[in-house]
């Protein structure tokens, strides 16, 4: 009797598609939501990068240094319609040359450990009196200076799958561009001062 019921059950095909769909559907929906989330991020990233490039080009012109808040507002205006509840952050650092962009201030490594320790002399390139891991000065600088312009937007994820995948509930997208200010004047070169503290 039991053997006959098992044989009949094995041959029964009705409902097999529903069971297979029930097994495959969660994975399919998870993959779809993940691809939508990543595609949305790529769209925001592309839009933000384009807006940053345009704003940075406008900032390199003479008089552009005084219009940074309006340029930031234009970036925000272009990206905000596609980012729900986004929080924007803008930073600008300027350098005298491309080779110094993002580089630490030079220091004398007395104990050869590769780390700037207290008491080791350094070249204060940005004039703030302290050693910095980034030798740039804040702002857009002057004529012929190199400017690193970064815009960052953080926003809540649009799909609730982040918890299942171990992702953060907030997505952060940033765009950076590096440009040289136009030669509308002579570049003001500050001489680095040796500081030993």
Image (tube, rainbow, N blue to C red):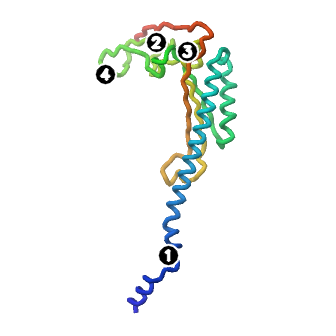
Crowd tier of the residue under label 4, counting other residues whose Cα lies within 10 Å: few below 14, some 14–19, many 20 or above: few
Provide residue 186's location: percent of width, then percent of height.
58, 6
In-front residue for pair 76/111: 76
Q: CA distance from mark 1 to mark 2?
A: 74 Å
Q: Point out the tag, 1 or 4, that comes first from the N-terminus.
A: 1
Question: Dot 1 corresponds to which residue?
Answer: 16
Looking at the rendered image, the disc whose residue lies closer to the viewer, 2 or 3, is 3
Q: CA distance from mark 3 to mark 4?
A: 32 Å
In-front residue for pair 11/78: 11
Q: Point out the tag, 2 or 3, that comes first from the N-terminus.
A: 2
Q: Point out the tag, 1 or 2, that comes first from the N-terminus.
A: 1
Question: Dot 3 corresponds to which residue?
Answer: 145
Q: Residue at x 61, y 29 (%)?
A: 52
- Can I make out residue 78 in this image? yes
Crowd tier of the residue under label 3, counting other residues whose Cα lies within 10 Å: few below 14, some 14–19, many 20 or above: many
Q: CA distance from mark 3 to mark 1?
A: 69 Å
Label 1 close to label 4 by CB (< 8 Å): no
Q: Point out the tag, 3 or 4, that comes first from the N-terminus.
A: 4
């Amino acid at each position: 009797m039991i053997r006959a019921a098992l044989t009949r059950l094995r041959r029964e095909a009705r409902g097999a598609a529903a069971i297979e769909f029930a097994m495959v559907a969660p994975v399919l929906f998870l993959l779809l939501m993940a691809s939508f989330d990543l595609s949305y991020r790529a769209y925001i990233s592309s839009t933000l990068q384009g807006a940053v490039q345009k704003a940075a080009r406008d900032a390199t012109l003479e008089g552009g240094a005084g219009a940074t808040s309006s340029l930031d507002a234009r970036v925000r205006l272009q990206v905000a319609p596609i980012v729900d509840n986004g929080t924007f952050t803008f930073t600008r650092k300027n350098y005298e040359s491309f080779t110094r962009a993002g580089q630490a201030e030079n220091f004398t490594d007395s104990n050869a450990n590769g780390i700037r320790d207290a008491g080791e002399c350094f070249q204060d390139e940005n004039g703030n009196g302290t050693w910095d891991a980034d030798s740039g000065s804040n702002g857009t600088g002057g004529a012929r200076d190199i400017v690193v312009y970064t815009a960052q937007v953080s926003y809540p994820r649009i799909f609730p799958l982040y918890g299942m995948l171990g992702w953060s509930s907030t997505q952060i997208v940033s765009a950076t561009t590096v440009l040289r200010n136009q030669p509308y004047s002579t570049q003001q070169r500050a001489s680095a001062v040796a500081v030993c503290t």
